[in-house]
Amino acid sequence: MIEEEKIKLMSKLAVYEKSYGTSDEKINKYYKSDYVYIQNWWSRISAVVGGILLIGLMLFHKIVAQEINVFDIDYRVYGTWIGIFMVILIVFYSLLSTYVYGKRYENAQGRINNYLQMLRQLDEYKPSNQQEEVKEEAYEPNLSNSRDDNRLL
Amino acid sequence: MNQIYQIRETIIGFYKTYEKVIFSILRFILSFIIFQFISRMGYAVVLTKMPVGILFGIIGTIISVQWFFLLIVVVICTHLAFVSIEAAVLVFVLSTIIYLLYIRLFPKQSLLIIALILGFYFRIPYVVPLFAGLFVGVSGIVPIIFGTLIWHFIPHIQSLIEMKSSELMEMPNTLANMYISTIQWLAKDQTTIITIIIFCVTVITVHLIAKLSIDYSWYIAIGIGAVVNLIGFLIGLLIVDIDINLFGVVLSTIASMIIMFSIQFFHIIVDYSRAERVEFEDEENYYYVKIIPKINLEKPKREIKRIVQD
């Protein structure tokens, strides 16, 4: 006997798995703080590389366009300015990245919560001896942990 | 009016049913156009061949947005490397900075860069600031600035290539000259600067008006955005001597406005799920399901005529 409601639920679950399953699973492997922490490091690395290229262009401009002698440059002053610039860049990208990846994590969590809700509904259609298996879904252990400390690390 | 709604419902229904196919075809066409546009540089002859263009089109359909941008950078730099290593290095460094500081973090919004370049190519660039103001918000200003800079930088590449060095030892000097030339272009090209300012003002205006809680605010926002764009270029033409054809701007703005009205009219489809084919199984059966989402739009009221027999 085919149950229409059950098929609807299974179809919705299948569509979710097909569209977001893999990407959400990757995100959900981490706590929110860990996910943001890892992504922040990649953002900082990108910002540092981009910043070095920008500074390189600026120095190139000083040396070539303004024809300043390499030996006449006051490296202490330039070093300080470059340091300040890099710190500002890194702080800015840390904040930006925290916001962007935090939001991505929350979106993924929202979708996974819906998915789990549908799984529970589907569970009601299953015979009682199989219900325990559904509860041990891979997503469930992580979802109960909403640790969100050291967000900016 | 009812007929228009009926047509809209039919079109949306058709689109939702075949969205995956339509979307893939559109992506292929756009990637193909972009790589054909790049191949017009013509320096690396092997990259200008039609099969290579088709191959890039197919690759562009499959890969993610971030990889797509990297592919574009690689193809452009390869073209340039055939004629001038220094120009290729300069373009590579500038593109890498844009990629690392923006595209990597905001891949989807970065599509506006490509959209704007294509807009300039098809002579309807004003549709992009209107679109950004309506659907992206103020953050859409950043890709619009990059897009405008890149488009106006393209003709400048030719003058960079003309500076190319004949000997290996001259390369650092040539690179320096190219760099200085680029900085000078950036500082002096008023058309680019004015265009960026006008686009930014348009995006902000459209965004603010679209957020107002009045009837048809989105359509009003498009209209006023188009007027702001037009007035901006008119002022730019009168005060600063920018290199723009006003008649072209008027026609293009009207076309952009019409396109945006159409997009706004159909935009409901963006938020909905699309047709899917899924396979799954339970203890008893295998299921092969095709899901077509229902689209609940305003349906035209039907007039019922009662014919009573005398």
Image: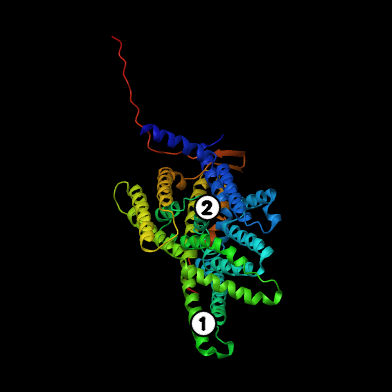
Please report the residue visible at 36 percent of the width from the left and 63 percent of the height from the top. Answer: B239
Q: Say whether residue A13 is left or right of residue B83.
A: left
Image coordinates of residue B286 in percent, x first then y, are: 63, 39
Image coordinates of residue A113 in percent, x first then y, are: 48, 55
Q: Badge 2 sits on which subunit?
A: B
Q: How far separated are the C-alphas under marks 1 and 2?
A: 39 Å
Question: Element at badge 1?
Answer: helix
Question: Element at badge 2?
Answer: helix
Image coordinates of residue A19 in percent, x first then y, are: 55, 50
Q: Quadrant of residue A57?
A: bottom right
Question: Which is nearer the eye, B262 or B149?
Answer: B149
Q: Say whether residue B281 is left or right of residue A124.
A: right
Residue B201 visible in the snapshot: no
In this view, B11 is above or below A134: above
The amino acid type, in three-letter code, at marker 2 is Tyr
The amino acid type, in three-letter code, at marker 1 is Ile
Q: Which mark is residue B261?
A: none
- Residue topped by disc 1: A82
